[in-house]
Image: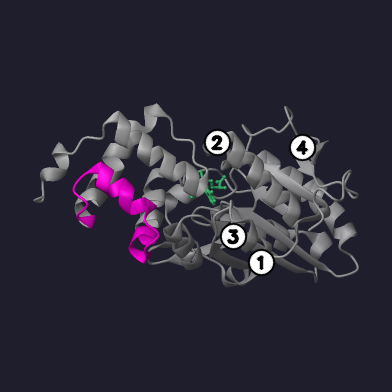
Amino acid sequence: MRPGDADFLTLGPEDAARLTAVFRDAAGLALGEDARFSMERKLRERVIATGTESFAGYAALLRAASPEGRRELDEALDLVTTHETYFFREDYQLTAFRREIVPSLAAQTAATRRLTAWSAGCATGEEAYSIAALLCDAPALAGWDARVIGTDLSRRGIAAARRGIYGRGSFRTSPLLSASSVVEPHDDGSRVREHLQRMCRFSQLNLLDEGRAATLGRVEAVFCRNVLIYLVPEARKAVLGVLFDRLVPGGYLMLGHSESLLGDPGPFEPVQLSDALVYRRPMTDSDPKKRAR
Ligand SMILES: C[S@@+](CC[C@H](N)C(=O)[O-])C[C@H]1O[C@@H](n2cnc3c(N)ncnc32)[C@H](O)[C@@H]1O
C-alpha cells in the first residue's frame, strides 16, 4: 500500500463491528454504529502506518497479545476517545466541593491531616490541577498533606498532564480562583505553578483494571466526570465498583452533570448539596461482604 491509499480505505459494517468489540472489551467503550465514519477517519492512517493493509487486519493486530498489538491498542484507544476538558469545568460542582465537601472531609481526616482526591479519567490533567488548586486554597486544609492522583487511559493525555503546560483553550471558563494562582506564563502557553504540580501524581490507568486501581490506595474524594457517558452499561457498573472500593467510608464521588446515578445508585448514597448532586460511600456498608476490600 502506498502513501495516499489511505483515502481509499473504507470501513465496512463488519469491520466496524470488529473494532467496536475490541474497544468495548479493552476499555468498556460504547461506540455505536454511528461511530463508524469517525473510526474510519481516525484509524485510517494507523492501518497504513502499521502495514496491516485493511481494517480487518488492523482489528486483528489490536486483538494480538504481542507488545506491538498492545502498543497499537493504546494508540487506537487514544484516537477514538474524547479528551475534551478544561480548568474548573462544571464550576457549580467544584464550588459545592469547596464549600461543603472539603470542610466535611477535613473534619473526617483531622486525625491524620491527610486528604487525597482522585481525578479518574483526567484526560490532559486540567481537572486534577483545578482540584489541587481548590484544596490548596481551602482554609480548613491549612497544614494538611493534600494530594491529587490523576489517571487516564490515554498515555498521551498523561504525558501532557505531567508536562502541565496549557494553551488558551484550557481556560475557556473563568476560573473559580484567579488564573495567576494556578498557572504562570510560559513560552508555550501557561504552566501550572510548581507547588500544584508537586501535589499531583499522574499515571496511565484503565478504570476497568481493578487490580491496578487498588495500587492507588484509598482516597477521600473521586472525580470521575464525563467518563461514564462513553461506556457501555456493564463497564459503567464495573467502574463504579472500582471507584466505590477506592473510597474511604464517608468519601465522596463526583460525576459529570449528565451522569446521574439516581436510576440505580447501587451502594452509593446520593447527597444533595445546595447546588449539586454528589454521591457518598456510606460510613458503614449495608452489605460488608459484598465490598470488603
Ligand atoms: C471527556 S474526558 C473527561 C476529562 C475530565 N474528567 C473532565 O470532565 O473534564 C474523558 C476521558 O476518559 C478517559 N477514559 C475513557 N475510558 C476510560 C477507561 N476505561 N479508563 C480510563 N480512562 C478512560 C478518556 O481517555 C478521556 O481522556
Contact, CB < 8 Å: mark 3 with mark 1? no
Q: Residue at the location (86% across, 70% down)?
A: 112
Q: How many numbered discs?
A: 4
Badge 3 element? strand
Report, in whole angstroms, how far the alpha carbon at label 2 lies from the one at label 3: 23 Å
Q: Residue at label 1?
A: 215
- Residue 266: numbered disc: 4
Inspect the image, locate mark 4, and give the three-letter code of the amino acid beneath it. Answer: Gly
Inspect the image, locate mark 1, and give the three-letter code of the amino acid beneath it. Answer: Thr
Q: Which callout, 4 or 2, points at the residue further toward the start of the chain?
A: 2
Q: Residue at the location (30% across, 43% down)?
A: 42
Q: Where is residue 204 in the image (x, y as percent from the top left)?
A: 52, 61
Foreground of the two, 39 or 107: 39
Q: Position of residue 110 (x, y in %)?
A: 89, 65
Badge 2 element? loop
Q: Which callout, 3 or 4, points at the residue further toward the start of the chain?
A: 3
Q: Is residue 257 left or right of residue 77?
A: right
Q: Which span is picked out in magenta? A: 50-71
Q: Residue at label 2?
A: 232
Q: Residue at label 3?
A: 150
Magenta segment main secondary structure:
helix
